[in-house]
Image: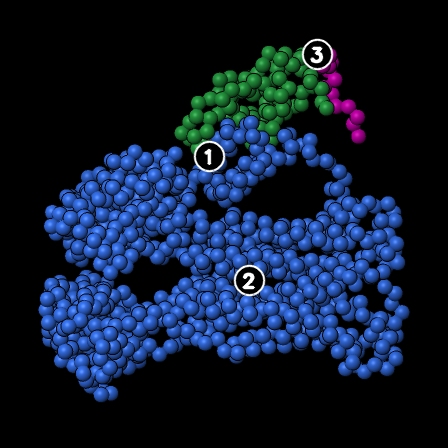
Amino acid sequence: MSNQPPKILRWLFNLLAPSERKVDMEGDFTEVYQDNLDSMGKWKANWSYLLNVITLFSFGHYLRYVKISNSLVMLKSIVKTRFRAIVKFRIGAMISLLTLSLGAVACGFLAFYIHYELSYDEFHTDYRQIYRVNSTSGNANGELTERAYIPLPAGPKITSEFDEVSEFARLQRIAPSVSYNNKVFEEQQFFLTDNTFFDIFSFPIVKGNTVSPLVSPQTVVLTESMVVKYFGSSDPIGKVIDIKVRKSYSLNFTTKSFTVTGVVSDPPENSHLQFDFLASISTLGDFKKDDWLGGIATYIKVKADHDVDLINQKFNPLIRENLGPYLQGRFNMSFDQYLESGRSVSFSIQPITEIHTAAGLDGEFEEGVNKSFLQILISVAALIFILTTVNFFNISFANGLHRVKEIGVRKSMGAFKNQVFSLFLMESAVLGGFSILMAALLVLIVKPFVPLFQVELPSGFELSFNFILAVVLSTVLICLFSGIFIATALSAVSPKEGLRGSLLKGHRGVNLQKWLLGLQFLVAFITLMAAAVFQSQNNYLLEADLGFDEDQVIVVHQIEKVQANDRQVLLNEWSKLPEAKSLSLSYHLPGGDFETLEFAATGSEQLLWPVLVADDYFLDTYAIALLTNGSSSEVVLLDSSDVMINESAMREMGYLEASEVLEQKLVFYGKKLTIKGVISDFHHENLYNQIGPLVLLPPGALPEPALNPYKYASVRLTEIDPGTIEQIEKGWYKVNPTTPFTFSYLKDDLSASYLAEQRLAAMIKGATIVAILIAILGLTSMSQVIFRIKVKEIAMRKVLGASALKLYELFIRQFFWPLSIALLLALPFVVSFSNEWLNKFAYRISMGWQVFTFSGLGLILLALAILTINALRAARQNPVKYIKVDH
Amino acid sequence: MSGRNSLGELEELILLTVGVLDQDAYSVSIREELSKRQSRSISLGALHTALYRLERKGHLDSKLGEPTGKRGGKPKRYFAVTAQGQQILQQVNDNRLGLWRDIDPSTFSSIKFQK
């Protein structure tokens, strides 16, 4: 856990502390904070720190700049009068408070979320000095891949040769089954690492060996929650856990025992490393010690006054010096020959705090969050902020029009302009205070809907210090900005105008207000239309015809854990079920990752094609049409020298007809394969990409027979129901009683690759709701203002015989231009913005006029409905009552 | 502006506490000592401003200590009462004792203005 106060509080401290005393005072404050952290927890410690900082301000150093006036008395009277006004004008007050709290909660939520995503890994004490070394490698085709790892021996070499680097820690993630005392679990976050891990990162060891827990081989440190999971309340230190792991390229063991040497506290939620187990990397011994082509995530700690560019420059000579001899020894190839073949490799360092937002590297430990997603959210937050400020200004100004007489009286009684100014400023501050109470209520109402946004938030965030601060701060800023505008506008009223109650100034203001309302509708139109476009593209992504039937297929994982001879037993067991229509084993799945391998057609150059390794029943299970076999998807049995390709691959070979390519040969790792069929193109990748070539390979055709040729079993059911899945699970445990049964629905797996888009769409939708609500609240209050101003005119016209329709028109006309222009301005903006977003997808909707018409029309109708209600009230009033109104 | 020679009650307490703590007088320990003896808690910010004011008046002197590992590596500022400070403490105390001396013991033993 971090033991520094939140950044914002430290910033406040820096602002208020006198500079000549800053150094030692910061020490004092930190010391007290850390003591408080232990004795009363983070929440109270933060508040007490804030209190300490604030008292720094109100006494002493700054006192001579602060004039004490009688404003406290004034404040008391304002709170009282505002409260009375709220009670008296319930609807108007509710509208303005609702606007304010809605905007503040939305902005506060967005600000909190953005700050949370950006604060990843800042809890490490020396986070500015921690970097990860990444590598960029190019294959023979010159395609570059950025990887989050470097060769195993590179870390020690860098540390011993670079003066700037003081320490390194390597991390290798494995996914074993861990057992202790008959308890067996599948673990995903099991890491092998160096003992220096605890020197570089700030993950405190709470129990056991705190100095060298991971020095000797076969030692392990667990998190507190793992201790509970495996050991309950008994002491884990010295106990031995056993792990079993699949044979792989990066490990030299399949089973091992580890002695528990320490307990580390669970990593904070905003850590990109989410480990459960940390085992000593020395367990690997000399394995791959000199392999300069392998890879392991390597973090380094540099000296405080480091120069990033200088470190990056030193990598190239290091690579040449070490990779050169390695290539020579293993492939008899010099480093220059390696470069000439088009391949390349380079290293660069990445600050640990940027890992979370730069996601997308190969071998990343966590999903991360897209930077452009955060940028969009920042603009959304800014839009909502402007919208709320404008609206709050509009509403308060409208209410202020009531009070020109009051201003006149105040001024003629001797109030100065700046006193009236501060009166109105304080009034909006008081309203801000009321609205914070309302915001708390709003958060409680909105909270159940937060999971809809599909974003990861710290648990219990609604009570966290930062969230409350963000909401309060948003409120304060909105009040401040709109308060200054209102106060400026209203304090300018001259005593003469004021006493006469003239609305001359008001009229000018009303024009401005109408255009501000137009601005609000502009934002509402933009967000609404963007949300409509996003929604229809997302629906398209989830419902598009993929070229195979993804419904009613479940995928059973971890087939690689099943012994080869048990596999058939398992399949037999499952095919006995009447609900299982078809079964297929495969190493890859549609929508997943594929390996790209080299093929050669006779008489043509190299072809780099992705490969899908599966058994003969794959096409049947996925209902993929076979072009060479007519329409029926009859099972074609392939032997180890047979292969199938898809239409795109056929076209790349230069054939147009499936019959021509049948029985042609493909050379694959020196072996000749016969093309036994052409399958129709289906979306084996997600819809971001065009359908490209694909080879369907039987496992027997692989160059070296793999130990585990299959990872997944796909089962097509007549109907997905829990009973059937239970039967499948039973079958699984009959064959593998020790490996847990894990499965997923194919449809869910496929939609998972669009999570980022769904998240964005959900956020935009939320923002749309807020924007529309605010625009509508603004319209309501605006139409009341118009009614108040026009009431006398309407009464006169009525007396002189105007029809209700004519009066209705008079009323509506006020809003015609602002709304139409908002709509016209919104259209080009949305079209260009959505086009840019849609261009990410190879398969996308065409933006028809329907999207815009329906969303635009919907909002206009809603606006008209609200206006009509008010217009009818105006048209149906009794003229006698209002004709004598003296503004 | 308060005079150079006046001393508020809090200021007096702080000066005395600095004297009690001797070598170990820095803001956090002063605050702890105050709350322990007086069961009165004062915020760190207010204490700092008071210490600053006392130093400006010349009643206190301060010097920076060695940086330590705890406290984020920041040094402590140690305080000591100056000769002027000791003098004014003495003066305040003399005034007070003078008043105590002149009170007739029988005055405090009976309650006046009974209702």
x, y percent for residue A426: 72, 48
Both marks 1 and 3 on one chain? no
User: Does the image show residue A674?
Assistant: yes
Q: Which mark is residue A35?
A: 1
How far, Cα to Cα, is label 2 from label 1? 36 Å
The disc labelled 1 sits on which kind of residue?
A: Asp
Q: Look at the image and give the colour of chain A.
A: blue
x, y percent for residue A76: 74, 46
How far, Cα to Cα, is label 1 from label 3? 43 Å
Give the quarter of the image for residue A513: bottom right
Q: Which chain does the numbered disc 3 sit on?
A: B
Front-lying residue, B73 or A715: B73
Q: Which residue is mark 3?
A: B98
State which region is magenta.
B95-115
How far, Cα to Cα, is label 2 from label 3? 67 Å
Callout 2 crowding tier (Cα within 10 Å): few <14, some 14–19, many ≥20: few
